[in-house]
Image (spheres, rainbow, N blue to C red):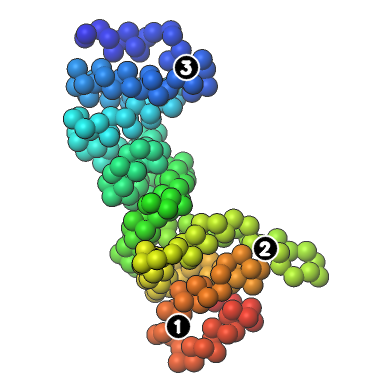
Amino acid sequence: MAAQPVLLNQSGFGLGESNNGPAAPHLDKLAQSLTMLAESQGPSTILGLVQQWLSGGKRRNLAVQARDDLAVHPRIGTSVRNSLRNWAKAHTLPDRQQAVAEICGQRFGGDFTHIALNRLRDVLETTRDKGPTLQALQTLGDLLANPDLMAQALKALVAWADEASPDGSVASGSAFVSLLTLPPTPTDEGKAPGKAPGPARVHALLTRGGEEGEAIRALLREGWRASRKHPVLRPEAAATLNGWCVAVEAGTLPRTEFKSVISVIFEEEANALDDDLNQIIGGHRPV
């Protein structure tokens, strides 16, 4: 059995090109086989291979799939999940940080969402590379768009914004605003703005029904309050809210739910709340 990792690493049955070669359609089965090997020899053996594959690049997809399988394993998963913390903070090894961000968007993120969110925050706070940052934000966006996970993901984003130090890093604190920013609305000269593209995520959050929906809108209010109070986050928050206003005017975001969320912004800033809201929602001045 001791020779199996070497054989796997040197074998020619497709592993070497598993990202897009003949083994690509069979990554699930290959990862399962690696997990079975980890059960018999211990996870450290396979984790060593995974590290080599990530560094080499060609077997990256298999490495991420195997790491995800190991992280959710009922017997050996605990030690693997613990090791993800070190990977997430390894700023000198951005390939590992990006792998962690990818894994958090797979089964690990669904089964151990709280832990996955912590690892994503670790990546955002420590990475010095654009790749891991973009992957972490993409994964957070996917979690936020998942109806079963959106409340938990949003709660984490709000907490990060609230905990962001005025003088320290806002890498994770800015995720709330970044993930709720709508793309610019295209305009034609002399014509009114068209519908803002890509509002599905924000629309889903605003219109979530039942008690969970009320909780989500309360979280949105808290997130905007925290972002507006932060000296670094405030300009981006204002621009993002202005984008929401445009989307409301275009009919792509619901007016009533929007008003219920942003009203909190003016509770401490203005006495004439209704006048301010009417001006904003009417499109007469930016937030």
Q: Which of the two discs, 1 and 3, labels the residue nearer the N terminus? A: 3
Q: Is residue 207 left or right of residue 193?
A: left
Residue that mark 3 sits on:
23
Asked whether the residues under the numbered discs 2 and 1 touch, taking CB atoms below 8 Å apart as contact, a structural biologist would say no
Residue 81: x %, y % from top left: 24, 37
Secondary structure category for the residue under label 3: loop
Q: How many marks?
A: 3
Residue 100: x %, y % from top left: 35, 38
Which residue is rendered at x = 46% and y = 12% of the image?
14
In front of the other: label 2 or label 1?
Answer: 2
Q: Is residue 14 left or right of residue 183?
A: left
Q: Quadrant of the C terminus?
A: bottom right
Question: Is residue 73 visible in this depiction of the protein?
Answer: yes
Q: Amino acid at mark 1?
A: Phe
Q: Residues within 10 Å of mark 1 (few under 14, many from 20)?
A: some
Rendered image quadrant of residue 51:
top left
Q: Amino acid at mark 2?
A: Lys
CA–CA distance in space, label 1 to label 3: 57 Å
Q: Which mark is residue 266?
A: 1
CA–CA distance in space, label 2 to label 1: 26 Å
Question: Is residue 242 visible in this depiction of the protein?
Answer: no
Nearer the observer, 62 or 208: 208
Q: Residues within 10 Å of mark 3 (few under 14, many from 20)?
A: some
Secondary structure category for the residue under label 1: helix
Residue that mark 2 sits on:
195
Asked whether the residues under the numbered discs 1 and 3 touch, taking CB atoms below 8 Å apart as contact, a structural biologist would say no
Which residue is rendered at x = 37% and y = 9% of the image?
10
Which residue is rendered at x = 32% and y = 62% of the image?
159
Q: Amino acid at mark 3?
A: Ala
- Above or below, 146 relative to 259: above
Q: Residues within 10 Å of mark 2 (few under 14, many from 20)?
A: some
